[in-house]
Image (spheres, coloured by chain):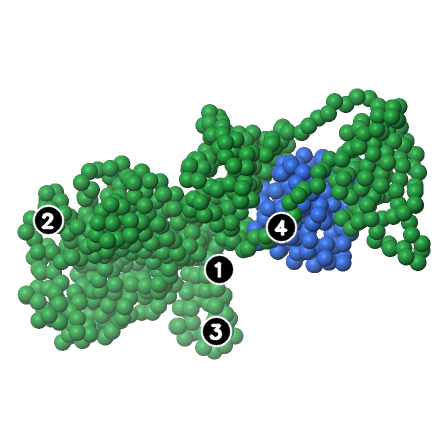
Chain colours: A green, B blue
Amino acid sequence: MALDPRFRALFETFFEEAAEGLTAAEGALLNLSPGSEDSELVNLLFRSIHSIKGGGGTFGFTHLGRLSHVMETLLDQVREGSRHLESHSQDLLLQSVDCLRCILIAHKEAVDVDEERCERLSLEIESILAAGPGAAKEAAPNTEVVESLHSQHGWRIAFQPFPHFMAHGNDPYRLIRLVQELGPTTIVSSFAEAKSFASFEPETCACSWILELRGEASREEVRDIFSWVEGDDCELEIVELADESASKTEAEFEVASEVATHATSQASTSVQMASSSIRVPVDKIDSLVNLVGELVITQSMLARVEQDNVLHQVPELRDGLGELERNTRELQETVMRIRMLPIGTTFARFPRLVHDLGRQLGKHIDLRLSGENTELDKTVLENIGDPLVHIIRNCVDHGIEAPASREAVGKDPMGTIDLRAFHQGGHVVIEVRDDGAGVNREKLLAKAAEKGLVEADAALSDEQVLQILFHPGLSTAEQVSDISGRGVGMDVVKRNIEALGGAIAVASEPGKGTLFRIRLPLTLAIIDGQRVRIGDETYIIPLVNIVESLQAKHHHITCIAGRAEVYRFRGEALQLVRVSEVLSVPRSQKSRDGMVVVVEGDDREVALVVDELLGIQQVVIKSLDTNFERVAGLSGATILGDGTIALILDMNGLIRLANSWRHSRATQSRCRLASQ
Amino acid sequence: MAQILTIDDSATMRQLLRTTLADAGHHVIEAKDGVEGLQVAHGCSPRVVITDINMPRMDGLTLIKKLRAIPEYKRIPIIVLTTEIDGKKKQIAKTAGATGWITKPFDPPKLLAAIKRVLG
């Protein structure tokens, strides 16, 4: 089929939709257990492939059409219950989904389609269709039977509508007019069936017609006019005028024995995917985000003017400012939500990953997903996929044991990986939990000692041992497999997550399994920050890191071993970090170490000493990396209402900086007063 | 020319229908499944309805039956869009109350001819 240039614009839509359809099909295939077909899943699967076939045919993608057609035929038989989906067919369908995806990409990038692969899969599915129960219905896609057209001198058409003819939305006069358009026609009406006026029913058809069409119109053309009504809604006889004896009845449809009992499909997961949406290029949204950022700055500038008490005499202006603040906040939240996407799109690739890896390693694994609708910033979402893939690979490869060893310890031979996402206090948390063997402490320690990461006889807490997992270049697999041993370690995972402003923690119980917990910020562009004064400078502490702020009580500060200072906070001793010393902020006359801000970072709490708390405000993060260079302890900068620049503290970095600063002074690490 | 209600779960197909029909001067109203189609149908009075069969939530056959139960839709032509070429499906569609069918992938001139056939 030659491609209409108008439809080129449709390509983009089709590619996106087809890709979504394939993902849905893949998900359905993976969730189908062979032999016990869930009709909802089969329907979803069928519909997905069906749509792709439709689109493929429309755009003239013959290979797409060919493969999806045989897939659809197979699925149709499963749907009708005349065939069970065996695991072989299931695999074949999965491979076919992959192949369809490749074909789509090939068309999108205008490169050659792997015809051989497509043909091989089509033939394999056809052989299943030919062999199995409910052999394939003979239906070839996109072919039209073209009858030889020989010139005729005319047709005599006996047209007798059934009484229900009009109830199907048909109109006999329209059909007659269409016949008239083919050539000069004589019309003879018959009212033989018409009842008396008293019993006349306007909704039933009681007439019949004999039409005599002269001209060169072919039998096909005449039949085409009646093609929708012939057989079901009317009796039709088309006879060549020249040869009346050779009358032929053109009945196309045999009455189906099957009764139409199509169950209404219940709302399925695909409904969410079909929710109304528009696709907007990211750069447009980003410029909107930037503008909103500027607006936030302007707003805080005006708010500052207000604080200066100049405007007390002008209440209208004050009200206006209040309004502006509310609107700015609302606008900002709305704009930010545009960038938010459900994490389900990222999760969608994992069932296949786990299925394939499990098969490769001979492990049976059930992957359970939850919280797919949890929304995350697009950038965070895009960058969290790879770390998650790595963690899940690790779970499958190192976490879950082989079925035999699981049975030996009385576990279900089928391993489980739980992948869930949820909101928690301004963050999104993603958890990957497996019910495998857990981290082998001895093996890990031995390996770490061998690599010189720890002292062979070091007394480490479980927590510290698990932290070794994130050490660069460590792989605990006895044999480096091509699954998780790709030279990329958990250290890269940790780094990537931290680059997103997130954190990863791990917990493990021998024999019970391992839990990876990733905490991510909702957005990267604007944060709520606490302004603090240190010396003569203003810094921003992200509000999410702050546990509590309090007046510094100097008798709560204890000096341990002469150097390390701790702050007593609710019976616990927190490492005290004097930000001015760590960042070498020049002390001025205003310095007074007045406030302690308890913050969370690097998986623990520390007490920061600052001079003064200034106020809470939204800050637009301007990257230091792009505008200057990466600085340890700082995550970026922002412009304050008065036009000055404030640096934003990065808690993880700051604590590490503080530790190395302290180490350089040869002091001891954190300790707990409670244990003393 | 005429108001036409199209119901299809595929955005590609909806867009294709819209392009073809709008180019021919028709006014197109869209719905993405049977449930939405039924809702939309209550709020407008199209001259023709074109619906897909395989759709989530409510399939085209159920939709046709429900439409035919509405007095205003008793005589409105309903055209089914189908990729299935065997007569059985068409028969089922007709029993449900469909006027006719168009085989997907459709040829734009053929679609317009079909519209013309029911609009006269």
Circle 4 — which element? loop
Q: Which mark lies nearer to you, 1 or 3? A: 1
Residue A334, disc: 1
Query: Looking at the image, can residue A280 be seen?
Result: no
Q: CA distance from mark 1 to mark 2?
A: 49 Å
Q: Position of residue A606 (x, y in %)?
A: 20, 64
Is there a contact, CB below 8 Å, between mark 1 and mark 4? no
Residue A261, disc: 4
Q: In the rendered structure, which amino acid carries the disc numbered 1? A: Thr
Q: Which mark lies nearer to you, 4 or 3? A: 4
The crowding category of the residue bearing disc 4, from other C-alpha atoms within 10 Å (few below 14, some 14 to 19, many at least 20), is few
Q: Which residue is mark 3?
A: A318
Q: Are marks 4 and 2 on the same chain?
A: yes
Front position in the image: B2 or A404: A404
Q: Are marks 1 and 4 on the same chain?
A: yes
Front position in the image: A620 or A232: A232
Q: Which residue is mark 2?
A: A454
Query: Looking at the image, can residue A347 be seen?
Result: yes
When the figure is inspected, residue A655 is found, relative to residue A598, above or below; the finding is: above
Q: Which mark lies nearer to you, 2 or 3? A: 2
Q: CA distance from mark 1 to mark 3?
A: 24 Å
* Residue A43 in the figure: left or right of residue A436: right
Q: Earlier in the sequence, mark 4 or mark 3?
A: 4
Q: Earlier in the sequence, mark 1 or mark 2?
A: 1
State which chain disc 1 sits on. Answer: A
Circle 1 — which element? helix
Say which quadrant the C terminus of chain A sits in. Answer: bottom left
Q: Earlier in the sequence, mark 1 or mark 4?
A: 4
Is there a contact, CB below 8 Å, between mark 2 and mark 3? no
